[in-house]
Image (tube, helix red, strand yellow):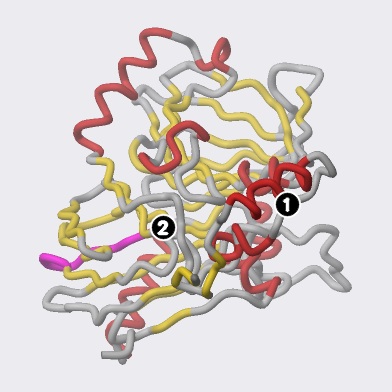
Amino acid sequence: MMKSTNFYNKPETTPEFLEFYERLAKMNAAPLWESLAELVPVTPKPRCMPVLWNYDEIRPFVMESGKLITAKDAERRVLILANPGLRDSTQVTDSLYAGLQLILPGEVAPTHRHTTSALRFIIEGNGAYTAVEGERTTMRPGDFILTPSWTYHDHGNPSDTPTVWMDGLDIPLVNFFNTGFAEHYPGEVQPVTRTEGDALMRYGGHLMPIEYKPSTLATPVFNYPYSRSREILDQLYRNGPLHPCHGIKMQYINPATGGYPLPAIGAFIQLLPSGFRGTAHRSTDSTVYCVVEGRGRSQIGEKTFVWKEHDIFVVPSWYSLFHEPQGDAVLFSYSDRPVQKALGIWREQAPMPT
């Protein structure tokens, strides 16, 4: 007798099979046909779930953490955004990590480096800084800031207001390969050796130093100011046309290669103009969104999430998605699309067939 599954017809597990499996297990082996449907599914089966973090609700916890522990004692004062489907593994998607980091006035988060790559998307505050390999950059809301793999970085806040940002890292991917390394800088803070804005001027102005050869896969620019990104979105909206699913959506790039800013993480920003209603689409890269401006709703699979400025939500792999703003809205997002494209496995339906 054969039992039907989504992928193939698996034999009924009889006592004869079970006796065979017991003997097989002693050889550190197992039958593929018992797990083939799980290992080779017909469609992606992400463990992460659609979820939204209301920033107004979680912000008090972020601020309370500032009363419990210093940035120095915590190394990094961060509240992990743990997906309900992955809570035990402290991940936001099956392959990525997210958290909300707080640095209070007068604090310094010590200098360290690690093999994981990180992005910072600034949510609130004005005047704190991140330093990367000897250059500081001031953090402003909407800025997209990077600390590539194995670069020394620290954070400081000489301003009089708290600064909060969303961290996005490829920790699950790095740990999957067992390639996680980290070390502290000899001092608490690395010396400043370059003028602020040098990297952006040197590499981000449609010019490159003569005979420049990238030494890593990461971008040499580590701050993409929101003021520039917002101006581009506005200009492209005036020029048209709108994409039926995405409105005006752009990806951040490595100006030296034209590729993604980090080897494992792609980042995007999009404008959803007033009156826009996106057509449903889906892709294989589970994606983390942060609302930069405005209000609206997103239909993710069978669930509808109503969002506003600073809220964060997750769209799992191959879930149908469409956005509908209330007035103009801007969304930032990041995913593991670069890895999927490098492996030749990324897929998108935009729009989805009806």
Q: With 31 as the anchor, is 265 left or right in this view?
A: left
Looking at the image, residue 344 lies above or below residue 48: below
What amino acid is found at the position of numbered circle 2 in the picture?
Tyr
Q: With 309 as the anchor, is 103 left or right in this view?
A: right
Read off the magenta span: 325-333
Query: Along the polypeptide, which appears first: circle 2 or circle 1?
Result: 1
The foreground one among 104 and 137 is: 104
Tell me the residue that label 1 is attached to: 30
Tell me the residue that label 2 is attached to: 226
- Rendered image quadrant of residue 305: bottom left
Q: With 132 as the anchor, is 138 left or right in this view?
A: left
Residue 284 screen position, x and y as percent:
49, 69
The foreground one among 202 and 320 is: 320
Q: Residue at x 76, y 23 (%)?
A: 184
Q: Residue at x 65, y 54 (%)?
A: 17
The foreground one among 201 and 112 is: 112
Residue 165 screen position, x and y as percent:
42, 38
Most prominent secondary structure in the magenta stretch? Answer: strand
- Rendered image quadrant of residue 319: bottom left
> How many numbered discs sit on the rendered protein?
2
What amino acid is found at the position of numbered circle 1 in the picture?
Ala
Q: Give SS at disc 1.
A: loop
Decide: few, some or many residues near mark 2? Use Cα within 10 Å; few <14, some 14-19, many ≥20. some
